[in-house]
Amino acid sequence: MSEKDDKVRLDKWLWAARFYKTRSLAKEAIEGGKVHCRGERCKPGKEPKLGDEYVIRAGFDERTVVVRALSMVRRGAPEAQLLYEETADSIARREQAAALRKAGALGVQTDGRPNKKQRRQLLGLRGD
């Protein structure tokens, strides 16, 4: 991290921190309202500062991260993880959401016609 890294665009930082695979995807996400700072939408040219807190939505996940370092260069994942710190509340919310997705809405998968076990579960829920 050189002295030139103190002025970096938000889309470039998100790409360097490995939240998005390409810089253009990071730019599209920012313009699409998937990145917020202090509850407001950001612009791709915004300059992140140390200590800034960003809420980043990607797919099903929503992360709240605090900027710990700035970089304009995309490096390996272990080095990229040093650029930010995810809040404990954010980690707990993501794990809870993942568990709910894994379990399904009612614990019954609806990928088509239910099998015998799923049919019994449905009948148990209805009280039949």
Image (cartoon, rainbow, N blue to C red):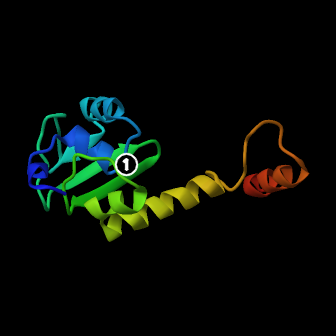
Quarter of the N terminus within the rendering: bottom left
| In this view, 64 is above or below 113 | below
Question: x, y percentage for residue 95?
Answer: 49, 63
Report the residue at 77% width, 56% height from top: 127
Question: x, y percentage for residue 107?
Answer: 69, 56
Q: How many marks?
A: 1
Pick out the residue farthest to the bottom. 88
Report the residue at 14% width, 55% height from top: 2
Quarter of the C terminus within the rendering: bottom right
Instruction: Tell me the residue that label 1 is attached to.
Output: 18
Q: Nearer the viewer, residue 67 or 122?
A: 67
Question: x, y percentage for residue 113?
Answer: 83, 37
Q: Nearer the viewer, residue 101 or 15?
A: 15
Q: Nearer the viewer, residue 125 or 39?
A: 39
Report the residue at 23% width, 52% height from top: 54
Q: Is residue 74 left or right of residue 110?
A: left
Q: Is residue 43 left or right of residue 58?
A: left
Q: Is residue 32 left or right of residue 70?
A: right
Report the residue at 79% width, 56% height from top: 121
Q: Is residue 25 left or right of residue 123?
A: left
Pick out the residue farthest to the front. 2
Tell me which amino acid carries mark 1.
Arg
Q: Secondary structure at mark 1?
A: loop
Question: x, y percentage for residue 38?
Answer: 14, 51
| In this view, 71 is above or below 86 | above
> Within 10 Å of the Cα at label 1, are there few (<14), some (14-19), or many (20+) other Cα atoms?
many
